[in-house]
Image (spheres, helix red, strand yellow):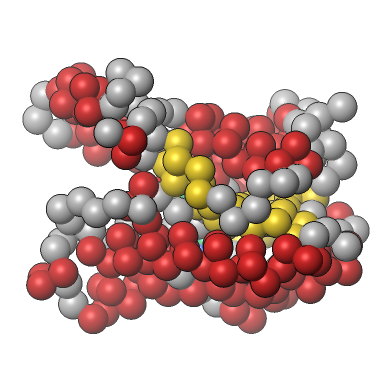
Amino acid sequence: MGRVQDKVAIVTGAGNGMGRAISQLFAEQGAAVAVTDISEKDGAETVRLIEEAGGKAAFWRLDVSDEAAVESVFGQVADRFGKVDILVNNAGISGVDKPTDQVTEAEWDTVFAVDVKGVFFCTKHAIPHMRRNGKGSIVNLSSIYGLVGSHEMAPYHAAKGAVTIMTKKDAATYGRENIRVNSVHPGTILTPFVREVASRGEGGLRGYLDIMEPKHPIGHVGEPEDVAYAVLFLASDEARFVHGASLTVDGGYTAV
Ligand code: ADP
């Protein structure tokens, strides 16, 4: 028996990095995974990797900032797999790396459309399916920057802060319906994207790690799988009394 055996899980932004790792782990643990992403190529590759490993998955192209598309795709997932047990709101963009006084309105709106409205639309249209099912679990990918500040990425901080408090608000609203809502707050995670950007910087990947590792009490940075295990726990019935929680996955970065 897997830890999410026979559950149906929708994962947004499942074509890369953490979304892919979450999808692969869920499938390995017995779930049927609705792999959704704005990129058809990346999402299809996630499905290929899952099927190659003997798991169950299907791809839907989905831009989470398009409400009509979210409603339609979630209906199709329920038709195809029979129900919706789990929603992982992972799709996100980090946007411009600027302080508040340098950010344009358009740059702000771009990040909020995906990172905040996307979570809103997906939650809104998952709830009726979970209600029909009598239970559900929603895991929102926020960030350590939805809990603490840093120097740059102003819209991203604000957006992830919104996701942190939406999680607690939705927990207050939907708990009595047996729909749990929690957030995960990754710190420095060595996704393929971060790895590539770091490799191009001065000193390469090693130089990046030499700066980052000492900042982490645990002595190293994270991998996408580290986030996936936290999401798996919250999504599974093992976390049946965990509700409205903010779980950091950051090697102690924000603890000190
Ligand atoms: P991480 O690995 O940190 O989750 P990535 O940027 O690698 O970050 O992955 C985020 C995923 O979200 C990507 O696969 C990307 O295609 C997807 N994505 C970005 N914008 C949207 C959107 N509007 N709707 C759905 N998926 C999106």
Q: Is residue 209 visible?
A: no
Residue 196 x, y percent position in the rendering = 29, 35
Query: Is 74 left or right of 197, judged from the image as shown?
Result: right
Query: Is 177 left or right of 92, judged from the image as shown?
Result: right
Please report the residue visible at 38 percent of the width from the left and 28 percent of the height from the top. 251
Please report the residue visible at 36 percent of the width from the left and 30 percent of the height from the top. 252
Residue 106 x, y percent position in the rendering = 26, 79
Residue 6 x, y percent position in the rendering = 87, 42
Q: Is residue 121 visible?
A: yes
Residue 132, by quadrant, is bottom right
Query: Is 203 left or right of 244, judged from the image as shown?
Result: left
Residue 224 x, y percent position in the rendering = 48, 33
Quadrant in the picture for the N terminus: top right
Query: Is 66 left or right of 95, judged from the image as shown?
Result: right
Quadrant in the picture for the C terminus: top left
Please report the residue visible at 45 percent of the width from the left and 41 percent of the height from the top. 248
Please report the residue visible at 18 percent of the width from the left and 33 percent of the height from the top. 200
Q: Nearer the viewer, residue 185 or 207?
A: 185
Q: Nearer the viewer, residue 93 or 149?
A: 149
- How many numbered marks, from 0 up? 0
